[in-house]
Amino acid sequence: MSMLIKNVHIVTMDENDKELVSGCIAIENGRIVYVGEQSDLPNSLSPRKIIDGKGKLALPGFINTHTHSAMTLFRGFSNDTRLSDWLSSIWPLEDMLTSEDAYWLSSLAIAEMIGEGITTFADMYMFMDKTAEAVELSGIRAALGRGLQGPDERSDMRLVQAKALWRQWNGQADGRIKVMVAPHALYTCKPQYLERCVNLAHELNAMLHIHVAETSWEFDSCMEEYDQTPVQYLLEAGVFDLDTLAAHCVHITDEDMDIMLDRNVSVSYCPSSNMKLASGFAPVTDMLKMGITVALGTDSAASNNRLSMIKEMHLAALVNKAIAQDATAISAKQALKMATRHAAKALLWDDEIGILSEGMKADLILINMDSSRYFPKGDPATALVYAGSGRDVDTVLVDGKIIMENREIKTLDIERIRHEADKIWLRIIKR
């Protein structure tokens, strides 16, 4: 479908930080073919659909680099507890989930993410084939990995499922799905099992997605057992021989950061989850200064309660100013880069998404700036990060297809999804 978005304020997020106060974006066959002034629009373009973007801000779609979508079931469950207690209360309930449950709970998360302007997410959980089905139907883009733990009585099965997921879904949904290998963490994957995960990633030529140094307990336990930091341990285990997305990285040393930079390890920074679970504060400003790719993630709705990238951008900018006692530590524009361009790079998708530029996939969002929060008119990035809300997201496109317009999601039956989620809640949590 050919489309023209006109009269819109465009923040491209490209390397030159190109911005147009009243420009237009032309789309054909799922890709952006023109970004610029309307007066320079090629006459050869004849769009079938025209969207008037007056009063709106066009941005690349937000990219959530770390979540567990089907854990929407546990939103609000076991709040205000330590991570170890939180995990021990949730794990037995997870054993009661079925693949059908995962489909509806993933759909619930996807609906929320679309409503928040998220066009791509990275997921690690079980029943990932069902999450893939929800991704395909919804029109969103995703990097999916079957969560791996072991060894135990189900560890072989998990590896089989991870390989089957790659064979069935990698590159599917018109290329909107890629599959990763996702060992949960070093404390849930013993050395010999972690080695098998790494070997599988080599076999599939897939990137790795793993939790790294999320808590002081994880750091201290690794030092006690292996006389190495988690990052040093993973380096020796061969994890960083592959493209790696490391979630959290809260408790890391200067030497760890040198290793991560040298091995091109990308970080998914999850400020809400880290604070809610009292995990601590990741050294984000240090990582960014070194040149490490730092993106943003929400983590699950269970450890965050919201799947909002605007919220994570807001916290990333404010919290790190306070930690560094430096108001310039992370600017609004830097936070926005972490949710778009940096996030695309972290998922090895930066050749297709993350910026608004000719030739890129048309994954973009329109933000309604008619709210009083955006007046008087100033810098739109600052307004969005410091005052914006997910409710301001008006339109969402992925691959040039409208999946939400005027805040109405076009691809999912929201009422059915909520009904099914309530049934699962009553069966498992309220049993």
Image (cartoon, rainbow, N blue to C red):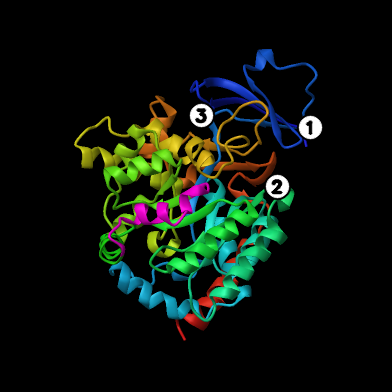
In 3D space, how far apart are the residues under numbered discs 3 and 2 (Cα atoms)?
23 Å
Could one spot residue 416 in this view of the protein?
no
Residue 238 is inside the magenta segment: yes
| Residue at the disc numbered 3 | 13
The amino acid type of the residue labelled 1 equals Arg
Q: Magenta part of the protein: which range?
A: 226-244
Q: Are marks 3 and 2 in contact (CB under 8 Å)?
A: no
In 3D space, how far apart are the residues under numbered discs 2 and 1 (Cα atoms)?
24 Å
Label 3: how many Cα within 10 Å (few below 14, some 14–19, many 20+)? many
Q: Are marks 3 and 1 in contact (CB under 8 Å)?
A: no
Q: Kindly identify which numbered label has been placed on residue 181.
A: none
For marks 3 and 1, the one nearer the N-term is 3
Instruction: Indicate whether 253 appears above or below 39.
Output: below
Residue 156 in the image: x percent, y percent?
58, 74
Residue 362 is inside the magenta segment: no
Q: In the picture provided, is 40 more to the left or to the right than 347?
A: right
Foreground mark, 3 or 2? 2
Instruction: Indicate whether 156 appears above or below 41.
Output: below
The amino acid type of the residue labelled 3 equals Met
Q: Kindly identify which numbered label has been placed on residue 48.
A: 1
Foreground mark, 2 or 1? 2
For marks 3 and 2, the one nearer the N-term is 3
Q: Residue furthest bottom?
A: 431
For marks 2 and 1, the one nearer the N-term is 1
| Residue at the disc numbered 2 | 175
What SS does tag 2 mark? Answer: helix
Residue displayed at 70% across by 47% down: 175
Residue 285 in the image: x percent, y percent?
30, 37
